[in-house]
């Protein structure tokens, strides 16, 4: 609760939720993007069964990396960018966080920082990595972008 008023947010974990993020942002106090579940729904694949076919997908060039470890920037990433853009257009300044297993991968962290998320929720053991990659993302920003670049907040109490 914020000043006695309940805070209401929503998870963006399905393609439909990403596509209507602007509408959701008009009614929510914050959004959180669940990268692991969004990856599963975008790929129509269970991370529990992916080991059966991911090697074949990678060897045939269908996927360059394991999308459950490294965020897929082409499919899942585009939906995340679309969702953030729509949400911020509908509700400027709405806090947007990201949670999921991708917060333990440097490449994914850099991508997420470039999207403009406000917060990355992670497991405690990857907190130093998230802080380091977030700082690197700010430093790597174009000089004209650096004045507005912010390091995403990383709550240390999240257990995702």
Image: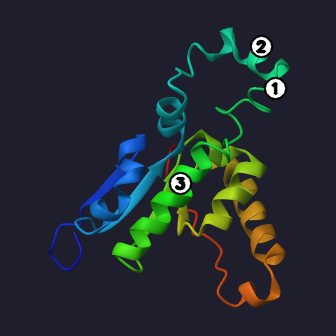
> At 70% across and 57% down in the image, what residue appears?
111
Q: CA distance from mark 1 to mark 2?
A: 9 Å
Q: Which of disc 2 and disc 3 is earlier in sequence?
A: 2
> At 34% across and 55% down in the image, what residue appears?
20
- Whether residue 156 can be seen here: no
Q: Which mark is residue 117?
A: none
> At 67% across and 41% down in the image, what residue appears?
72
Q: How far across and down, in percent of the image, does residue 108 sit?
A: 70, 50
Q: How far across and down, in percent of the image, does residue 84 sit?
A: 48, 64
Image position of 34 (left or right of 68):
left
Quadrant in the picture for residue 149? bottom right
User: Please, is residue 64 above or below residue 46 in the view?
Assistant: below
Q: Which mark is residue 80?
A: 3
Q: How far across and down, in percent of the image, does residue 113 sit?
A: 66, 64
Q: CA distance from mark 3 to mark 1?
A: 23 Å
Q: Which of disc 1 and disc 3 is earlier in sequence?
A: 1
Image position of 23 (left or right of 68):
left
Question: For the residue labelled by badge 3, is the local secondary structure a helix, a strand or a loop?
Answer: helix
Q: Which mark is residue 61?
A: 1
Quadrant in the picture for residue 138? bottom right
Question: For the residue labelled by badge 2, is the local secondary structure a helix, a strand or a loop?
Answer: helix
**Crowding near the residue tagged with mark 3, few <14, some 14–19, many ≥20 C-alpha atoms within 10 Å:** many
Quadrant in the picture for residue 152? bottom right
**Crowding near the residue tagged with mark 1, few <14, some 14–19, many ≥20 C-alpha atoms within 10 Å:** few
Front in this rendered view, residue 79 or 47? 79
Residue ranking furthest to the top: 52
């Amino acid at each position: 609760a914020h000043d006695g008023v309940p805070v209401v947010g929503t998870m963006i974990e399905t393609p439909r939720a990403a596509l209507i993020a602007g509408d959701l942002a008009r009614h929510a106090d914050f959004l959180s993007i669940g990268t692991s579940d969004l990856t599963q729904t975008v790929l129509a694949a269970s991370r529990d069964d992916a080991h059966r076919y991911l090697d074949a997908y990678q060897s045939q060039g269908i996927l360059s990396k394991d999308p459950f470890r490294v965020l897929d920037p082409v499919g899942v990433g585009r939906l995340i960018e679309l969702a953030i853009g729509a949400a911020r257009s509908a509700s400027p300044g709405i806090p947007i966080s990201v949670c999921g297993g991708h917060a333990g991968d440097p490449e994914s962290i850099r991508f997420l920082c470039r999207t403009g998320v406000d917060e990355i929720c992670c497991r405690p053991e990857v907190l130093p990595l998230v802080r380091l990659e977030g700082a690197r993302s700010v430093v790597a920003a174009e000089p004209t972008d650096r004045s507005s670049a912010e390091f995403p907040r990383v709550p240390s109490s999240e257990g995702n």
